[in-house]
Amino acid sequence: MSDSAKALDGEPADIHPSDRLLRRFVITNRAALGSLLVLVLMLLIFFTANPRVFSTWNLYTSVMTTLPVALFMTVPLVFVVTAGEIDLSFPATFGFASLAFAVVVQAGFDPFLAIVAAVAVGTLLGFGTGALVVYAGLSSLVATLGMNFMLRGAILILTQSKSIAMPQLSSSLAFKVFSSTLFGVPVQMFWAIAFVVFCALLYNRHRFGAQVHVVGDNPDSANEMGINVNLVRVKVFAFMGFGAALAGVCSTMINFTWWPTSGDGYLLPVIASVFVGGTPTWGGVGTVFGGAIGATTVAFIQTGIVGAGLSGFYVQFFNGLIIILSLLGHRWNQIRYR
Amino acid sequence: MAEHLIELRNITKSYGSVYALGGVSLHVDRGEVVGLLGDNGAGKSTLIKILAGVIKPTSGEIVIEGKVVSNWNPARSRAAGIETVFQDRALAVQQSIVRNVFMGRELAGRFGWLKARQQVEEAARLMREIGFTSKVFSPRSIVGQLSGGERQGVAIARAILKEANLIVLDEPTTALSLTETAKVFHFVRQVRAAGHSIIFIGHNIHHVYDIAERFVVIDRGKLAMEKPKAEVGSVHELIQFMENVARPRRAQMGEMA
């Protein structure tokens, strides 16, 4: 016990312990808190613009129905960016994994089994993409872009661009567990929150997260200290595939239908969410909660613009405006040490 | 004859017909600071890479506490308690001190979850041990906020994490100011006081003279001098010697030009 008291010697002694905790909390989470500020400000502006619409619960339910899909992808992408890489292939992985889900459900198997199949397919595709990037020494930006086209093309060839409807899903237990409503909130929102919290712990309090940070920060040093840098990199791509599969299943369960284009629309919003959330582009640092808040911000823009009474034509413009404003804001938080 | 902690016997290293090292012997005893000097290309880095197991010597023996070790490699070097702090970029500067100290050897419990508190306490202990007493920084501070000398301190703390016997510091004070160099010296003295041995490699003869107790000078792959501080006398004599070592080569280059 006396040992732990002594261990604090290295910390400033003139600051009250609670101040120190609060200060540390603010400093370590400043990127996420900054993103939260952007979200709150944006919602306040929307609310002032049209208080009637923004006090109806329906508006929030509709956002929370699709937000989980984005969360399942944004958070793993924070890991990828922290490791110093980027993945543009997750929309096609999303499509492929949810295709596996749809095919297994169509074949008459239990949707739970279909979920397992989808997750396996997604993780495996992520692993394959990662192995290609890492062991062939390709640029992740270009190689994953190629993978995205190739996998999407494979989907179109395999299905002849036909969608798959699964009305039987609505009566399944899996639907109740993953896609119904609880206390007026879409139940997938609770799963997504659990996923975000788990990932934040993985990111900050697990050996994997620690190694992802170090590999993104200084791969040479990580290698010298005995970390298998390539394996860590492959793992983040596999994790991205895992998240894309969850997102694919979640999206398919909401719609009862699988489309050959499913996942495509998420590429840019998900990438934007990571950076709006306060993760810088250069690797080594990032924030899982910030990413989740970024995804929420991006999800609210469209609903908010229309809800505030502007025409849909404004959506793109405000999407861009929020991204630029967030990046300008984060410049103050993101100090790049060399 | 007393057993040395670590001894390199008659080490040679050749690349084809070119000898990088032509039979160098070097020993380190417990708790001493050896200053390793030599011009660029003299073979200093080849020697310490052999010691770290990164390069295999062409011939020669590596002897740990009196026992000849065969199949010397990085794992055996580390198992023998040899930790090398390579020149620059050894740290992940956007990460905390704790994360750097435990890089690749995280203290983790079941399923890989980190023992965060234990890591912070252990890092704080190591920082105290090397005399890193700044009140401004805690183990959770980001390395990028530290000065050059303090960063070397973190690298040294990381080196002694696993009860290292011998710490090899490759040019730890190059590009550092006087104040920062003094900090590194302070860390080195603390580490030696704790019983670790050190090989201190440097370009700056004054730095090496100040910190080391015994000097080894290598020139063109050969041992040019090996003397304890008492026999060297003063830093000027050491500088004089280094200049004499360098002179024949300058003369040769003059003839060629």
Image (cartoon, grey):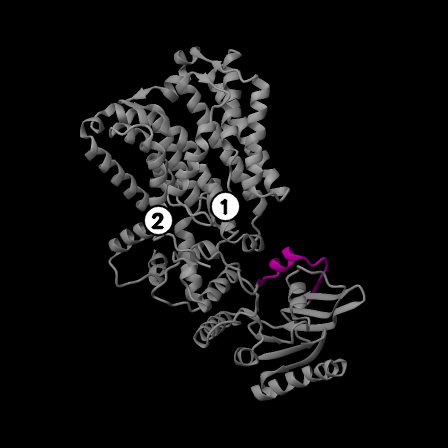
B65 and B152: which is toward the camera = B152
| A292 over B131 or under it: above or below | above
Using the rendered image of the protein, determine whether residue A256 is visible from the camera's viewpoint: yes
Q: Which residue is mark 2?
A: A328
* Amino acid tagged 2: Leu
* Secondary structure beneath label 2: helix
Q: Count up the numbered dots.
A: 2
Which percent across, then down, holds residue A313? 33, 30
* Secondary structure beneath label 1: loop
A296 and B41: which is toward the camera = A296
The chain holding disc 1 is A
Please provide the residue range marked out in magenta.
B67-84
B115 on left or right of A127: left
Distance between the Cα atoms at labels 2 and 1? 23 Å
- Residue drawn 36% across and 51% down? A331
Please tell me which of labels 2 and 1 falls first in the chain. Answer: 1
Q: Which residue is mark 1?
A: A83
- Residue drawn 70% across and 73% down? B25
Tag on residue A41? none
Which percent across, then down, holds residue A262? 47, 24
- Residue drawn 47% across and 43% down? A81
B239 on left or right of A177: right
The chain holding disc 2 is A
Give yes or no for residue A40 being in the magenta stretch.
no
Characterize the local packing of mark 2: few (<14), some (14-19) or many (20 or more) Cα atoms within 10 angstroms.
few
Which percent across, then down, holds residue A21? 29, 52
